[in-house]
Image: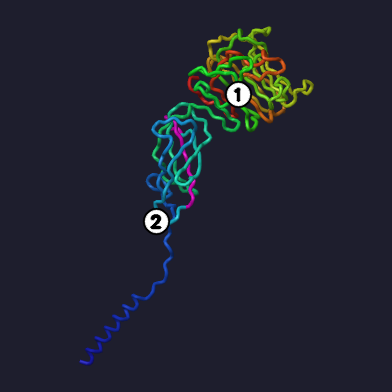
Amino acid sequence: MFQKKAVCCSAAAMLVLAVACSDAPKSPASPSSASPVSGEAAADGSTLKVTAPAAQSPVNGAQPQSLTFVAGASGAQFPSGSSLPPLSYQVEVKNTGGTTVCTGTGSASGSTVTISPSCALAFDANHTWRMRAVLGSAVGPWSTAATFKSPIGGFFRGNEVYDPLYNGTTVGQAVDAEFVPNVGLRLNSHTSRVTYALPTNLQQGEFSVMVTGVDEGNPGDKTKIFTMQEGTGDITDDDYRMTVEKRGRQYEVPGAVTWRIIMGDADEHNGRIFDGARIGVSFSDERWYFWKFTWGTGRAALEVREDGPRGRVIYDTSRGTGGFAYRPVPHFVYLGSPVGRGGPQDASIPGAIYKNVWLSNSPRPNFPGE
């Protein structure tokens, strides 16, 4: 009996010891990670555990005035209580053929992401856009693609200008000019003009525009299609004068086309004045003409075509300009011309109608109707 009792006591002691061991404090475990970065890509290719941004504007085929994309910011998908590091965002724009034609980056402000990429899209054309969050090399899921139509309105971005004009507005400053609905902007007199004051000079690039209402019968003498200069003094002897001319009926060869660019010194003895060939051209005031002037250190050129950028060439001359840079400060650009010492008859062309102005160091995009 004593032996049986001893065995029972021993079993009880072992039970107490086991319970005591199970209640012993455990060594602390390392805190669990709540990183939003996933080690493996999800089915949609994302490696960042966040929600997709929610497209807000433009959507459903809307046509904005400017290229700005707005979406709701991404939220965390990992456990609550974890903080989400600051995210950056990518936007991607595709044309109707599915080709990516524009990308941009930005960050959220509160619950909203706004990105305004610097891209030259085909104008007045259907596109789609989508956005996703980015953290280092990790990327979140794309938002659902939203449809929109690229802007028809113009823009003035630094020293790049697009001014359609046929939409009844201008990004420049117009004097004595009127809009012809769905056609363009008409200069009413020799003193009419549109001014673009560039915040930084454009030392090389393209200045091109479509013009109608011009022929050999326009009034005037050494009248100008478009011009550039430094400051607002007399353009005739400006050190950075650039003039493209279609001469009027008072000139000895009405309709003659020529151009001049001065690379930093208007003194005729210093070798910085360069003229294009003067050639008589037959115009029709009912036809559109494409005028394109290009310049840079070493060369300048003027090209004129019938009907548009791919029409028949009716004037094309270029020449070297030495090693001189074109760098007016401040840089002023005009449709037409301010009046110089030659008087109003040497300034703008009364009756000339302009549309689709392009000023940039990038090639001219394809514009509607060209």
Residue 134 shows up from this direction: yes
Residue at image location 49% in from the left, 37% down from the top: 103
Magenta-span inclusion, residue 28: no
The residue labelled by disc 2 is 80
Q: Is residue 59 left or right of residue 343?
A: left
- Secondary structure at badge 1 equals strand
**Which of the labelled discs sits on residue 167, or is there none?**
none
Residue type indicated by callout 2: Ser
What separation in Å lies between label 2 and label 1 (alpha carbons)? 56 Å
Q: Please provide percent x and percent y for residue 138.
A: 46, 48
Residue at image location 43% in from the left, 41% down from the top: 71
Disc 1: CA contacts within 10 A as few (<14), some (14-19) or many (>=20)? many
Could you say which is closer to the camera, residue 114 or residue 263? 114
The residue labelled by disc 1 is 207
Picture layout, residue 8 above or below residue 134: below
For the residues labelled 2 and 1, say whether their Cβ atoms are less than 8 Å apart: no
- Secondary structure at badge 2 equals loop
Range covered by the magenta-colored residues: 85-99
Residue at image location 39% in from the left, 39% down from the top: 144
* Mark with earlier residue (2, 1): 2
Disc 2: CA contacts within 10 A as few (<14), some (14-19) or many (>=20)? few
Q: Is residue 29 left or right of residue 357?
A: left
Residue type indicated by callout 1: Phe
* Total labels drawn: 2
Name, please, the residue furthest toward the front. 176
Could you say which is closer to the camera, residue 224 or residue 78? 224
Could you say which is closer to the camera, residue 297 or residue 345? 345
Q: Please provide percent x and percent y for residue 84.
A: 45, 53
Q: Please provide percent x and percent y for residue 276.
A: 68, 17
- The quarter of the image holding the N terminus is bottom left
Magenta-span inclusion, residue 97: yes
